[in-house]
Amino acid sequence: MKNYLLTFLTLILFASSYSQEDGLKKLKDAYDRLDSVEKKSIKTEKFLNKGFFFKNRVAEFLKFEEEKLDSYFSFVEPSSWEVIYQGLSKSFLKKNSDFPETDVLQIMESSKEQEGTVPIGIICVEGEYLEDYDIDENIEATKNGFLLDKKYKKYKIFNGGILKNKVYSGTIRFEVLRDLFYVESNANVKSISIDFSDGQGFREVSAGEIINVEYDSDGEKSIAVKFELNKEREFINYSKLYIVTLEKEEPYLSYDLALPNSSKQNSNTTSRGSSFFRGQALVFRGCDRVFDRPVIYVEGFDPLGDSNAYDIQDRFQVANIEGTLRNNGYDMIYLNFYSGGGDIRTNADVLEQLIETVNDQKIGNNDIIVIGESMGGLIARYALTSMENSSRVHNVSHFISFDAPHLGANIPVGYQKLIEDIDDINLFSLLNISISEVDDAMTSVNSKAAKQLLLRRLGPNPHSDFTSLQNEFQNLGFPSQGGIKNLSIVNAAVDGSVNEPELTYSPGNKLLDVDFVNALSGFIVVRTNGLNTNTKVSSLIILTLGVPTTVREDSYNFNGFNYDMVAGGTESNQTDNIGPDVNFLLDVFNIASWFGGHTVNDFGNSLFSFVPLFSSTASTAPRTTQSHLNRSVAQLEANNWTPFDKIYGENDNSQHINNSDIDDSWADLFQDEFGFGLTSFCNQTIGSSSPPRPRINTDYWYTCEVGSRTLFIVDDGSEIANLYTHTWTVTGPRNFSLQGKTLRMGPGLPVGTYTVNLRRSYSSSSGFSGSSNAMSRTFTVYDEYHPIYGCSEGGDPGGGIRKTDDIGKDEETVDEDEIVQSEFEKGITIWPNPVQGQVNVKYSMPAEGNVNISLIPITNFGGETVTITNSYRPLGEYEETYYTSALKEGIYVLEIKTDFEILKYKIIIERP
């Protein structure tokens, strides 16, 4: 290990003399080196190294074949499906007219416009993947004229999955695209079937087939594409489909909001669907069916347009927050901006227009309530104060700021710089990185709103747009017209504590570490900043054949503040727990995993404070030391250090704009301000109604085959005992159902991804009637070897193979059991014998070194030796096959010479 580190440091120092152009040339040279491999030796005519320069992109498929597993699986998202498709396309050594050449990105983009339709791509290709020593050996043999006709290992690449992962209907039309269906005959695939998690199990599918599925609950669904092979083997690709709602509720009103002429418009910021900013607002009436108590809910940061009004509604329905308001006669209005990453001030103009429209159209004299989610809180504050400054009446009684970053938001600088560095390496095509994902991440970081929001942007300081907007807010203050109440509800711990293990790290600690060592090696390190010191917050290093070809390191001098580890609404580097405001980080972590695969480590430091408590409370308290960032709400209110009339929250830090962990705070707010708590029934026209959608929680959404995890129902605070009956239905590798408040997954469940469906109904003893309500989540059981999720490694797949005797022993027949034992002790075995067409060699290397394998005709012992291979091998186990059809029949000595020993074996070569 010490030698390795010394070599690595030496290479990094050596890299300082390389320009980026030199490094890029070196990397491309290494890629072009693959063209020197003798093409005739690639029997399948698919050279997988050409398509997958980073080996870890095909790690699951290699494991499936190398360990001869009967069943295995991998995860496929739309972006990764496209990456594997591109890699396979590049792997063909000859143009194949049957392999589909289709613009996958265009198909995925077009599918967004086809509501209720989900396209599916299915591809299976068999090819050869050569280890680095195989490549060296092949090139050297060709150069020196060795007889190398080696049989390389063949691997099947399975790529089956959905190309769209979010829908707004429970009635889905799945289409197996004929243009993206390609299964090679030599891949020995007997059948392909799909389990849609609808209770019907696997059903066989074919190209062009359309499958209509009706779901009875929203939430996550596991879509499993199974490739059934000969010899009772199978490989399954799992995708995750999210159903936002079973049926889009028809809005009472829909407002299309065009931007009025404004000097605040920024021409450099793009919009969706028009040359100017605008938005759309959907109105859903309360249970009294009268549009008289409007609540405007303002969208937060959404630079890529990932969310529409129904997505925003879906978030606010969690914990029955929306249901409570509508059951008390309030009308919900969801405002979605068509440029969710645009100038905050310009989007405020759109909100002003909506407020004026609602005032004109609502019935009666009730005032408006405005709730601003995250950045939407800043937009709402700007809109309301601007209207007041221009003497316009807004008729807003309550401004509720929902975890809004009034003094700035925070993303660790290292993560930001990693985005920029990955974009700068300019090797997307070579490394199979999805350009669209990098572009999305860069669009988010470079958006106008990001520049206005981030406390630190791409370095230790904010952008000038941040400073400019903060100065404006200082002058504008907070709304004050008509006795409006300014309230804040936060995801930060209101006592200023930081007790979460994933958040209690120290300045300068690592947040992310990715190490992938191979012919092409990737090293990524992200750190949280130190205090009053210089910190290298991000480094991205790519080594090609041991030579640094890309080096990106970012170091800055930081002041005495670290915003990553303070009390606040949190975000995560765990892909299952990333919120909508930082959805673009998914792209970064996906790309990072392509470099490192199964060697990603976050050291337990998976959380960071996205909206610090001092920001969500708009604290005016002095901040001169790190501890000042965690002043409690009680301190702020006692010293009049906040402009809010009241602040609501819990004593734990929770995920930004997640209602589930702060539902008690919402209940307190509703009770204090409006005189009602969380309720499931309409207080205007009581009748049959659906119970609130149930919520499931657990520590992690996975377990290991030998472990278990308990899923439980989050309490909705009903005052009526035994009001509900809960039924769990689990579909996947094993189907089962039960009733109760908890569900235990494992131990002993088959590996794979399950769909866990929870249905809530009124119990027969409750006295209430109405339809049921349900939701679902996906849950994965990993096999015992899995290195990422801490499952223990065990087992040694393999079996007995016929072995031959050493030439130095007597030529009489030897008992096979004795041969197996003696040869196993030496660690080298040869089979079959006699040889007909190909010879197999299995051996182990206790350390790295050279291997020379030669054949010597036994009738001419002093004659010319035929070199099969002379090449380097790293430490490990090897099983190799060489073709012998070019040799004459007869008896040979097969000599295996390593740095550790020389062994000779007698073999007989016959014509096949």
Image (spheres, rainbow, N blue to C red):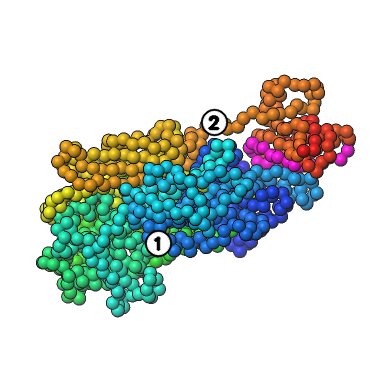
Residue 527 badge:
none
Q: Residue visible at 24% across and 72% down?
A: 353
Q: Residue visible at 49% across and 49% down?
A: 205
Q: Is residue 598 magenta?
A: no
Could you say where residue 405 lies in the image, as x and y percent from the top left? 30, 59
Could you say where residue 777 lies in the image, as x and y percent from the top left? 35, 45
Out of 816 and 651, give the one closest to the viewer.
816
Local crowd at mark 2 within 10 Å, few (<14), some, or many (≥20)?
A: few
Which amino acid type corresponds to the residue marked 1 in the rendered image?
A: Gln
Residue 114 badge:
1
Q: Determine whether the residue tagged by mark 2 lies in a helix, strand or loop.
A: loop
Q: Residue visible at 16% across and 67% down?
A: 362
Q: Which of the 4 image quarters holds residue 812? A: top right
From the image, which quarter does the N terminus lie in? Answer: top right
Q: Is residue 544 visible?
A: no
Which amino acid type corresponds to the residue marked 2 in the rendered image?
A: Gly
Out of 602 and 815, give the one closest to the viewer.
815
Out of 489 and 1, give the one closest to the viewer.
489
How many marks overall? 2
Q: In front: mark 2 or mark 1? A: 1
Q: Is residue 278 depicted above or below 628 in this figure?
A: below
Query: In the image, which residues are magenta?
Result: 863-883
Sequence-first disc among 2 and 1: 1
Q: CA distance from mark 2 to mark 1?
A: 47 Å
Residue 795 badge:
2
Does residue 443 appear left or right of residue 545 in this picture? left
Q: Is residue 865 magenta?
A: yes
Q: Is residue 590 depicted above or below 190 in this figure?
A: below
Local crowd at mark 1 within 10 Å, few (<14), some, or many (≥20)?
A: few
Q: Which of the 4 image quarters holds residue 851? A: top right
